[in-house]
Amino acid sequence: MDHGLTRDCKLQKLLAILCTLHTLTFGVNFNLETKVQSINGVLDRSVQLKCGDIDASYVFIWTFIIIGTDQAIPIARKDNVYEEASALGIVTLAGSSLVITKLELRAEGRYTCMAFREGTYITAPTIYIDLTVLVPVTKPNLQIDEQTPEEGSRVHLSCTVRVGTGPLNYIWQRHTILDGSFNIHEGNESVLVLDPATRFHTGWYTCTVSNMVNEETSGRLYLDVIYGPDDPEISIKPYAISETGFAANELEEVTLNCSASSNPPCHYIWFYNNSQMFTGQMYVIPKISRSQTGMYTCLAQNAHLNTRTQATIILTVYYLPEGSPTCTPRPHNNYMDVALWCSWAGGFPLAQLFWVQPNEDNKVIVSKSNATLVKNGAQLQNGSTFTCTISHPSLKREINCSTTVVMPPGGPNCSAVATKMNEFIMLTCDWAGGQPYITLEWNNNQIGDIKESSNIYVFKPDRTYNGRLFTCTALHPMMVKPTVCLVRLEAPVLDSPNLETSVLEGEDAQLICILKLATPSSEITWYDNTNKEIITDSQKYGIYRDNGQSNLTVRGIEWGTDNGFYRCMASNAVGNTSLLLRLSVKKYPTPPNVTISKLLYSRQRTEVDLEWMTKGAGDLTGFMVQRQASIRSVKIPRRSVQAASWDTVANDIEPEIRGHKLGGLDPSIVYAFRILAVNHKTTGFPSEVKTPADPPNNIYPAAIGAGFAGMLVAGVASLLAFQYIVRNRENNPRLHDLFFRPAPGEARENIRNPEDAETAADGEEGPASSGDQGPEGEAPPEESAAPSNSEVPLSQLSPAPEDDPVNVTITVTATP
């Protein structure tokens, strides 16, 4: 039975009843035209049901029939909503439209709207609206029966929703870091079966459920498929392949990386030649060495599954030979050919060596570690260059080693030297430069060995070797014939341009000795006139040597000391010789004699003025003044004065000067002076000895002034004293009587003049005897000239007797 038709009949009957009632009441006939609509509403949302196109003059009635029943429930009339409508939701009227908000699930059914114009028989079409309430789907719940399955097992994923109007649609999604998000399954299936589960099923899973209203997505669940480890793979940086595996250059940083697919990630252990070395995926060797060549094994372990796999590689460490490659030409085939030798021995693997010949584009591998190329020496041009190219796995690019075949300029040099104390003779032959080096031999290889560039032969000396000839022969592949140099051993031979040298006293003498011949070479030794060896750092002697010549300088020649024979001597390992050189020293002529013409004190007796003159002929170069101090109170005999030491107070006085002033004298000391003429180093006879005389009137002005000042002061003091005594006669009668008693009859005065006695004493000595003779028959000044009145010391004068007392009577009249 069709329930829809039944419901329509019942509604039509209801409407017919309503129409009849309305006709009876208002006398109007209804138009029974109807319209049926279907509308979907959503739970808890709003829906609007329209009652057609009617205006405000119509009266409308809304009724509701629950699905499955035939009971019509009025829910609204114009401007009024019945209480029964609250079961459907919140019902309101918007004009003739019925608005239901917060739609309830019970609101599902048929809604009828009938409308007629009030007071007439005009009716509007009846509106039938079938409302279906749709329920949104809720958030799905995702479940996995095994979240960490092993690879190959079966896994079920289920997705369920609590409510939702069907039909429902399911979408399964997997999210991974590598491949992103993608759909796995779409349809009505709420269960996803993975059979078998593989590592590629690992990831985050979600399911999305949708219906006509909405769609919802579940939360994420992670499916972690456990597997592995697979066989590990070992990679190496820097990457290089050898015959047995991988290769690395010594001192490089080598990184070994082990990778094996596994879930959970596996644990790595590194082994070197079956010995555990490191734990971790990446093994870094900062500076690998040749000793680290060997097998490297990576062991991968899955602790969850307790499974393991491993992989092994062989790493070979390449290293260069020590030092640098050597390229050099060598004599070959009895010095007829040149063997070009290139070598760089050692290393691993051995270096590849190539000789690149001039004007040839191709290169041929000669050998490993060393290579030799032989060329005819006579056909080579001087300065020909040959290049050896070297390759090695440790080199980024090939390197070159070049050598040039050169014939050195010049020729061999031969020399002979002796060791210290002539214990050995050393023959040296050298010829530096060239490639290959020059080969040298002594006396056709009869003595010593054959050597390159320099050949030294050492033997003990013997006098019989004097005049012996030695030959050094030089050999080279580019020479047409050998070259020789000679050295002959010879004893020294000395010579001098002047065998006798004459100089004046005080000058420097130079003696020259020349070493003309000596092999081995020798040094010249000097001996003085006493046959004593002269030391080079002596202040008296200076020795200068230059190119076989030795100059001896004798400084400040002294007559009677430095004249005589000097000897120069030279010796070497095969003999010795000496040469005598005579040195004659001459004196300068004696200068003329000198006499003192003036010797006078200054007023303070601290300076003297000295003047002199010369007697006789002769050369002179200057004058010197000498001084001697004596004490006035002591009598000094003439011979004692002469024997006493003299101090030179002035020297190097120019020869044309005849006067000199001396200062710095002590007034309490009596000085004696003398003067001498000098001709270079020769000194003449000293002059007569004199003491300075006082200047005229040097004491009287001072004495008179002092006496007058004293009398003036005494007079003023006496006058004041007498005035005091007179005024105080009563108080001091004794003092008054002492000064004013009667005076004696006469006063005596005895005054002596000490200067007179000194003057008389100075004249006692007579002239000196004429028996003493000086140079050139003249009497010495000290003996021939008598001293003047100022020569005799004051100590020779007899002391004056003490003076008698002097009585002085002074009469003073004072007015009280």
Image: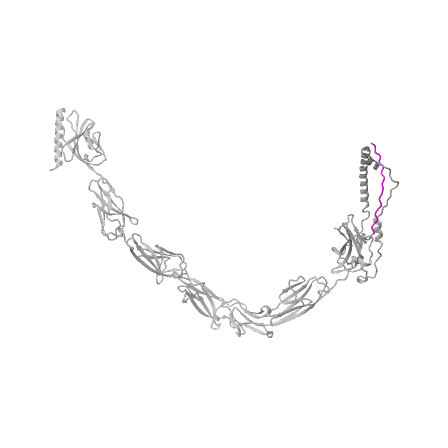
Asked whether, in this view, residue 185 is left or right of residue 795, the answer is left
- In the image, 337 versus 216, the foreground residue is 216
Residue at 21% x, 38% y: name it.
135
Q: Quadrant of the C terminus?
A: top right
Give coordinates of residue 761: x percent, y percent. 84, 53
Establish if 514 lies above or below 800. below
Residue 602 position within the rendered picture, expressed as x and y whole percent measured from the top left:
78, 49
Q: Give the vertical position of 575 relative to 628 (above or below).
A: below
Farthest-out residue, right: 745
In the displayed orientation, state which residue is furthest to the left: 1
State the predominant SS element of the stretch in magenta: loop
Q: Is residue 173 magenta?
A: no
The part of the chain drawn in magenta is 798-815
Residue 370 placed where, x, y %? 43, 67
Q: Please give left or right for residue 782 compared with residue 179 in the image.
A: right
Left/right of residue 572 with respect to residue 183 in the rendered view = right
As for residue 809 lying within the magenta part, the answer is yes
Q: Nearer the viewer, residue 525 or 272?
A: 272
Q: Quadrant of residue 40?
A: top left
